[in-house]
Amino acid sequence: MRGSRPHNPNADYVIEDGIYFYKESNSGYYLGNVSIPGRKRRYPMRLHVYIWQKYNGEVPKGYHVHHKDENKDNNDISNLELLKAYDHLSHHASSEGHVDLSRRNMNEIARPAAIAWHKSEAAKGFHESQYQNVTKDIWMAPVTKVCEICGKEYTTNHASANKSRFCSNNCKATFRRRSGADKVEYTCPQCGKTYMKFKYSKAVLCQECAVMKFAKSSPKKKAH
């Protein structure tokens, strides 16, 4: 039992007021079983909290006891201070060691485990069930919008509503022609002039060169 003399003489512990506090391997804090006045049983308490309460009374709700020098082995009362819980957690979360540990756990444990699960048959069944029972009705719900070209109302679904702007492919094509979205800069191989043409067009020559080529290739009418 924590708080009693250890069975293992090599255990890492300290004694305070006759109470044995054992060092936790996962956290680095010392933990012991402490008697609390008015209660029959002992309760687990960390050494730095015990020391603080010994000199200052019970820790107020919403506050944590903090080691000023970040050394969990230094539990002298002069090294302990009260911090608001949010400030204390934020302080440790922003420390370089904590960030590195979190990043390493994410890259080496959490992310590979997530990837493996998403490739499993269980994940496929779960996602299919979620789609059929929850997501499908939401994504396929009808949404009424107004076409940006012709102004006509049309119906699409919730999944496509944010990107949908036109009622038909004809209106979409009209928008692209007007905006010049499909035009590219091209150099006429005959005269060397640069001109703009639709990127899907099969035309090679600029308009002037194309007219001249057509005129030369057309048969001349004989004079009567």
Image: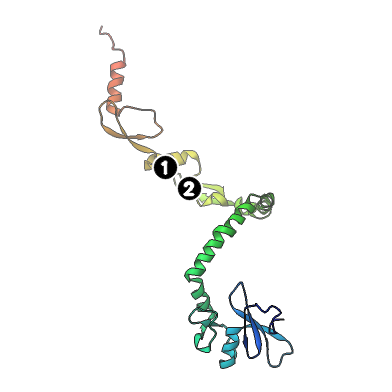
Q: Secondary structure at mark 2?
A: loop
**Does the residue at mark 2 contact the one at mark 1 (Cβ under 8 Å)?**
yes
* Between 54 and 4, the one nearer to me in the picture: 4
Depicted 139 relative to depicted 211: above or below: below
Kind of residue at badge 1 = Phe
Q: Is residue 201 above or below residue 133?
A: above
- Which residue is disc 2 drawn over? 165
Q: How many C-alpha atoms fall within 10 Å of the one at disc 1: few (<14), some, or many (≥20)?
A: some
The percent coordinates of residue 89 (x first, y second) are 53, 75
Q: Write down the residue under mark 1.
A: 175
* Residue placed furthest toward the front: 9
The kind of residue on which mark 2 rests is: Arg
In the rendered view, tell whether residue 224 sits above or below residue 19.
above
**Image quarter hosting the N terminus:** bottom right
Number of marks present in the image shown:
2
Disc 1 is placed on an element classified as helix
**Between discs 2 and 1, the one toward the N terminus:** 2
- Residue 103 at x, y percent in the picture: 52, 62
Residue plotted at (29% across, 20% down): 213
Instruction: Name the quarter where the C terminus is drawn.
Output: top left
Q: Nearer the viewer, residue 35 or 195?
A: 35
Residue at point 31% right, 16% down? Answer: 217
Colour mode of the rendering = rainbow
Q: Residue at x 29, y 34 (%)?
A: 195
Q: CA distance from mark 2 to mark 1?
A: 10 Å
Percent from the top left, x then y, of residue 41? 73, 87
Few, some or many residues within 10 Å of mark 2 (<14, 14–19, 20+):
some
Position of 180 with respect to 96 (left or right) is left
- As drawn, the residue found furthest toward the right would be 40
